[in-house]
Image: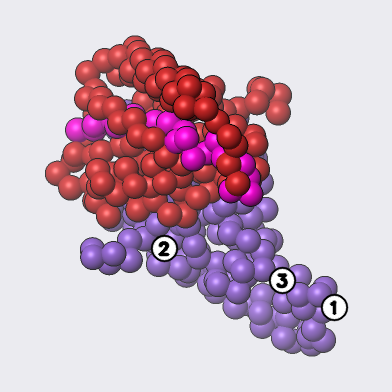
Chain colours: A purple, B red
Amino acid sequence: MAEAAGGERKIVVAVDESEESTYALTWCLTNLISSNFKDTLFLVHARSPPALYTGLDGSGYMLSSDTVATMEKYGNVVAESVMKKAQKICRDLAGDIRVDTRVEGGDARDVICQMVERLNADILVMGSHGYGLIKRTFLGSVSNHCAQNAKCPVMIVKKPKSPAS
Amino acid sequence: MAEAAGGERKIVVAVDESEESTYALTWCLTNLISSNFKDTLFLVHARSPPALYTGLDGSGYMLSSDTVATMEKYGNVVAESVMKKAQKICRDLAGDIRVDTRVEGGDARDVICQMVERLNADILVMGSHGYGLIKRTFLGSVSNHCAQNAKCPVMIVKKPKSPAS
């Protein structure tokens, strides 16, 4: 695992289309980014692979190649939109920070943990939910998985429900 | 949930006798504490309550009052030792930071989450393990529970096993 040697840190932020992910990124920029360090932010987005459109018993749906192509195109559009929004937030809140982006197809849990390892990241930041209720129910919480398996400290940021809650 | 308004933050660090907890505190002091903020560190330690010495089926062991008293005394000695060690680390790594301590009897999951809420903390920092293998197996991971239930962002810091891993 990487240490914050020489004041340079690689911070991976997992981003998706959820409000919680936006909140986690905002929180990171206002609370974690520090003038004490030379931080580089890596915005990482996991695009669902066609494999995730198979049935839960692994039997698979009979999807036409047109349908698969449409789904992949949709995944690319979502990824582009997520990244544009995330980059804008970075510019607005921390204009001078170095930002890099990574989009990979695959299960979010694997994509995020592998990216942390490949980049030798110092910190992983992510929302506690996101990635949809159904997927979470069947695959388990992405954040729990990453908190246990990512090879760096993990910051789990929950979006507050309301001031009264 | 508290926001980091006016640059003042309350950071709760869960401390116990594990090496991982020591590592999490050290990581917090070198990575999270920032001159951008006026941070106050709250070192929180959960002392196991007598209730945890009952059997797993709730039947309870027949413990003499002497045994209970000895266990409580042991809990106090551990708490004092944990806090002394944690305070020394704070002095050594961030001499000018404000540090407060809280020791409460109870299950670590409840003590930590309740303390976060009572203090209206901005960040909770903790190790991913600690609290003993047996308790973790039967009660579930303390860090998973806190990541899902604490009313603030949660930083889970794992002690790296070895440089090669």
> Where residue A23 sits in the image (x, y, percent)?
36, 59
Who comes first in sequence, dot 3 or dot 1? 3
Residue in view at x 23 percent, y 63 percent? A163
Which residue matches tag 3? A52
Count of numbered badges drawn on the protein: 3
> Where residue A74 sits in the image (x, y, percent)?
60, 78
Which residue matches tag 2? A20
Magenta-colored span: B38-58
Q: Which mark is residue A59?
A: 1
Q: Say whether marks 1 and 2 touch (CB < 8 Å).
A: no
Q: Is residue A36 above or below residue B134?
A: above
- Most foreground residue, A144 or B119: B119
Left or right, residue A73 beside residue B91: right
- Assign a secondary structure to mark 1: loop
The answer to whether any part of residue B31 appears in the image is no
Q: Quadrant of the C terminus of chain B?
A: top right
CA gap, disc 1 to disc 2?
A: 32 Å
Q: Is residue B43 magenta?
A: yes
Residue in view at x 33 percent, y 18 percent? B87
Residue in view at x 24 percent, y 43 percent? B119
Q: Which residue is situated farthest in the left direction here?
A: B6
- Assign a secondary structure to mark 2: helix
CA gap, disc 3 to disc 2?
A: 22 Å
Protein chain holding label 3: A
Which amino acid is tagged 2?
Glu
